[in-house]
Image: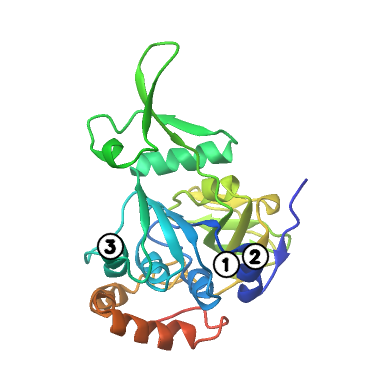
Amino acid sequence: MTKAVRFLSLADAIGECVRDGDTVAMEGFTHLIPFAAGHEVIRQGKRSLTLVRMTPDLIYDQLIGMGCARKLIFSWGGNPGVGSLHRLRDAVENGWPNPLEIEEHSHAGVAAAYAAGAAGLPLAVLRGYVGTDLPRVNSNIRFIDDPFTGERLAAIPSLRPDVSVIHAQRADRAGNVLLEGIVGVQKEAVLAAKRAVVTVEEIVPDLRPPSPNSVVLPRWTIDAIVEAPGGAKPSYAHGYYKRDNAFYAAWDAISRDRSTFLDWMRTHVLERGSESHAVQI
């Protein structure tokens, strides 16, 4: 059955599509990171989420620090260009505010797992992990023999999120979505998911001819579209605004201390309405 995409408010889209206990993927590589949607998940107090992201950075630090997560599936975690994610470290090392289970993969592994999920396959097979320590700490990395050549290959479970959330530049009034610039695994994450929420900078009558490095997600892949200008800040949106590098630098000090972190989240996220999409220091 073809999905019927709907244009919703951010609060309604998150309220209807993200449920306690879900596996939630929020993707966007260096830009188009869905901060506004992540903040709405925090405001609505979603709990026991398994968070999936190729490169968990500030928005996942915030989700973890606010007690939304029970598990993280990822391939790299940090504050890009700055250092550690202190709320992630506190959860793993000290169980604050909740213990956090982690499942670490390579970038290639996560990308392959999304692609396998999008194809409806139970597992992804790739050349990788051989000679690394990841199989020692991740029981979901196993090895199989190619039945045709005998080559030893890695196998990992496919990723099939309950809901994937991404940010994009534009959607047309029919519900098709355009992503431009650096395109990571957003397409695969959406196609692999049971439900998909897309926040966009603007809704336009129709999509202009896309650039060579762009992706159009057809309406049948999406459940809810939200017009959320600035919804990727402090990351950037190609063609709309630049990355707020000062925010990333400042986050290191804000997130080191639990009380400072909670005070900042209370002022800049919890006490702001869901229509205030761009959060800045």
Residue 232 in view in this figure = yes
Q: Are marks 2 and 1 in contact (CB under 8 Å)?
A: yes
Mark 2–mark 1 Cα distance, whole angstroms, equals 7 Å
- In the picture, measured across the screen, residue 111 lies left or right of residue 80, that is right
Q: Is residue 83 above or below residue 50?
A: below
Instruction: State the mark number for residue 225.
Output: 2
Residue carrying label 1: 200
Neighbor class of circle 1 (other Cα within 10 Å; few <14, some 14-19, many 20+) is many
Give the SS element for disc 2: strand
Instruction: State the mark number for residue 258.
Output: none
Residue 78, given in percent of the width and then of the height, sits at 28, 61
Q: Is residue 115 above or below residue 47?
A: above
- Residue 265 figure quarter: bottom left
Residue 36, given in percent of the width and then of the height, sits at 50, 73
Q: Is residue 3 above or below residue 38?
A: above
Query: What's the residue at 22%, 67% (across, down)?
Result: 82
Mark 3–mark 2 Cα distance, whole angstroms, equals 28 Å
Q: Which sits earlier in the primary sequence, circle 1 or circle 3? A: 3
Please state which of residues 69 and 114 is positioned toward the viewer in this rendering: 69
Q: Which sits earlier in the primary sequence, circle 3 or circle 2? A: 3
Please state which of residues 34 and 31 is positioned toward the viewer in this rendering: 34
Neighbor class of circle 2 (other Cα within 10 Å; few <14, some 14-19, many 20+) is many
Amino acid type for the residue under numbered disc 2:
Ile
